[in-house]
Image: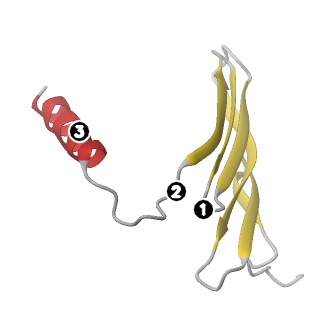
């Protein structure tokens, strides 16, 4: 209970804090649909960030339930370039792909 009170107090302080810069990002678009066995969301901010993801619960009700997720996120780096990561996360782990990410050599 103490943790919850402390968390809520810190959250309130963060929300009430004045903006750090005049160009702070604002949310341009935000959608989400969450169900018992699947979800999807997407959002975009004024500073060039965006993300989308969808996930499905596989093998529902069995001992081998797993969540399969695919999505992407983008941001503008310090160099002004837009970087995008597309990913899959499932029983085989997190598998990101992006033009700027290193790729293991073929064996």
Q: Quadrant of residue 87?
A: bottom right
Q: Which residue is mark 1?
A: 47
Nearer to the camera, 97 or 42: 42
The quarter of the picture where the C terminus appears is bottom right
Q: Is residue 91 in view from this perspective?
A: no
Considering depth in this image, is 86 or 84 the residue closer to the camera? 84
Left or right of residue 20: residue 81:
right
- SS for callout 1: loop
Residue 59: percent from left, percent from top = 74, 22
Near mark 3 (Cα within 10 A), the count class, few <14, some 14-19 or many ≥20, is few
Measure the alpha-carbon separation of dots 1 and 3: 24 Å
Q: CA distance from mark 1 to mark 2?
A: 5 Å
- Element on which disc 2 rests: loop
Q: Which residue in the structure is indicated by mark 3? A: 12
* Of the two numbered discs 1 and 3 in the rendering, the one whose residue sits closer to the viewer: 1
Q: Nearer the viewer, residue 83 or 60?
A: 83
């Amino acid at each position: 209970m103490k943790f919850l009170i402390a968390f809520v107090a810190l959250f309130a302080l963060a929300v009430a804090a004045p903006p750090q810069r005049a160009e702070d990002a604002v949310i341009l678009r935000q959608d989400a649909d969450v169900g018992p066995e699947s979800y999807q969301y997407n959002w975009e901010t004024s500073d060039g960030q965006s993300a989308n993801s969808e996930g499905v619960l596989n093998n529902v009700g069995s001992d081998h339930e797993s969540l399969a997720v695919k999505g992407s996120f983008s941001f503008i780096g310090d160099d002004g370039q837009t970087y995008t990561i597309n990913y899959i996360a499932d029983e085989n782990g997190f598998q990101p792909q992006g033009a700027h990410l290193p790729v293991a050599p073929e064996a």
